[in-house]
Image: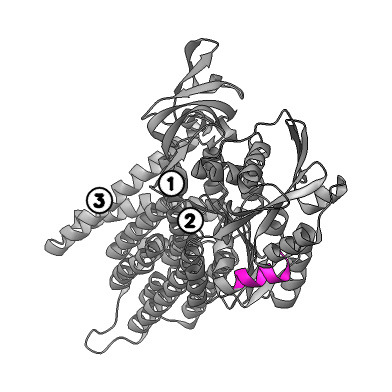
Amino acid sequence: MTTKIAKNLPSLALFEEKFFMIFDMFLIISTGSLLVAEIFSSMPWLHQLMAFLAFLGIIPVAISAIKTLIEKKISVDLLASIALAFSLVSKEWSSAAFITLMLAFARIFDQITQARAKKTIQSLMKYHVENVRIRVGDSVKEIHIHEVRPGDLVIVESGDRIPVDGIVVSGQADIDEASLTGESELVQKKAGDKVFTSTVADAGSLIVRTEKVGSDTTLARMVSLVEEASRDKNEAELAADKFTQWYIVVSLVASLGMYIYGLPPKIILSILLVVCADDIAVAVPLAYTAAIAYAARRGVIVKGSSAFEQLSKVKYILTDKTGTLTRGKPRVKDVKMYGLWTREEIAKRFVGGAAESNHAVSRAIMEYAAEYKIKPHLPDELEEIPGQGISFSHDGDAMLMGRSSFMEARGSRISAVVKKDIQAEKDAGRGVVCLSINGEVAGLLSYVDELRPHATAVIADTKKVGVNEWHMLTGDNENAASIIAHELNLQHFHANLTPEGKVDFIRRFEKEHSSSKSVVAYIGDGVNDAASLALADVSIAMGAIGADAAIEASDITIMKDHIDRVPEIIHMAQKVRKVMVTSFWIWGITNAFGLVWVTVGVPGLGLLGPGGAATYNFLTDFIPIVNALRAGRK
């Protein structure tokens, strides 16, 4: 895939990029050397060389300024090219040299801004596998990755990097998913589990049935999202662009006014040199790009700086319960029996009904069977009715397993005692599965969905970073929801909500609470919440590795189901915003001081001339840019 992307890049653009990188490095080294040499010597040839380099330096700046003018925009390059031309005409060779140096560094930093996102992409793309072994009948064949098709059985040995997204059909392995999730903890994979491109079989071997390959894989989607994110501009960046354009117009008009008024050309040139805003033009996008790249390394995909901007202002979080605040993985709590049936007989029949089902509760029942060494009564016949239950038989007994509504719909009798127990389990926050034998409910199995570790601490941590309220949305009844909310120390919960009800609630809530300074976020589990994710001001899909609908619908995708990433990314978004604001303040203060120095002077330092103004601007340029790089650190 790396090769494919490289081939698609226009060769002319690659040549141009490399040429100007070498050109700028040449200008920096040669101009810097001449400025150092000038300290020790004032030979005329030094000034001639400075003039020649400045003339070379003005070419790319003037081209860029003309291009933006054709697009009916004004860029910093226009102001810089005027200042550079003015320096050459005024024979201010040192000033021209420092402007050349400053502009070359600005272009280098601009390339760094673009390269940071590309570096993240390249760090992902390096995991790509070229040759793949597939099983064809009883033989093994080695083919190029581009020849792999959905349905092919790919062989993955210990130490191999998995080349496709797919389902494990046989084998078992501990998988390192750090390349996608940022987590170093190994994940055990067995038959039926999903595996993803770029992850590594640390120990064990697998046969994987290919589902996605190439540009359709989770890795390719991540790469695409990072590329899109690096091109996105939020309101703050657009405002910075607009401010820069007005600032340049004001600077040029003011310079013309000073010239008409009769101020000496050296003072006008000094002012122009001080007010060049190339540093802030680079610093603002650099801060967001650095943060997006850092988040990607942590397994969090942020769809552009707009998402960061919104996240930094989150005051309300709405969240689904199942799979978000809870593990989404049921665990059997208890088995009850009625009539003459024993616990062991009822348990065996529950296990028999669950043995051939892939439902989450069925898997929990099978884990319960393994823990207590229960041997199932395997069914003679079985039919699974999605969303309702299972109908099966064994030794002449007709059985149903599922919700109480499924029992009643199929004509099974539920005694008053059973109904009372069902309600008690639901009020305690537990789920219930009924077992009917020959038309009579003979057993109940209750299960719980455990809270995620540290969920309570995560909620508290988000409040420390400025979130006012958490609201839990659930389909549970009032009592069950109240119990979960109490365990999580949540004041706000909303029970008995259908999926449609959740969407309506989010819509109403945003109308009442959303504003430019108060943003509503929704956190979903990355599987069943696409509609809700699409509605919120800013949406976070958790555990969305492989869940295409959630990745498309959400603004922020946490690839692994770690809820503790939520306060981390909110803090990161706030940090980026602070870094950006700080960069503006640094730029404003240094410019104000520079203007005072070149117009009225500073006691003990006197008046700053064009050469000093260029030096001052060159040195202070680095402060907001270096400050912006803080956004990409923990």
Residue carrying label 2: 292
| Residues at discs 2 and 3 in contact (Cβ within 8 Å) | no
Tell me which amino acid carries mark 2. Answer: Ile
Mark 1 vs 3, N-terminal side = 3
Secondary structure at badge 1 equals helix
Circle 1: residue type: Thr
Q: With respect to residue 85, does 515 lie above or below?
A: below
Stretch of the chain drawn in magenta: 475-485
**Percent x, y for residue 268?**
41, 75
Q: Element type at marker 2?
A: helix
> Residue 14: x, y in percent?
45, 36
Q: Is residue 476 above or below residue 226?
A: below
Which residue does the image show at 43% across and 33% down from the upper left? 173
Q: Residue at x 75, y 35 (%)?
A: 392
**Res 208 visible:** yes
Q: Which residue is mark 3?
A: 29
Pointer 2 or 3: first along the chain: 3
Q: Residues within 10 Å of mark 3 (few under 14, many from 20)?
A: few
| Label 2 vs label 3, nearer the camera | 2
**Residue 10 in the image: above or below residue 526:** above
Estimate the spatial distance between the alpha carbons at disc 2 and disc 3, rounded to whole Å.
32 Å
What residue would you read off at disc 1? 120
Circle 1: is it few (<14), some (14-19), or many (20+) Cα within 10 Å?
A: many
Q: Is residue 403 magenta?
A: no
Quadrant of the rendered structure where residue 118 is?
Answer: top left
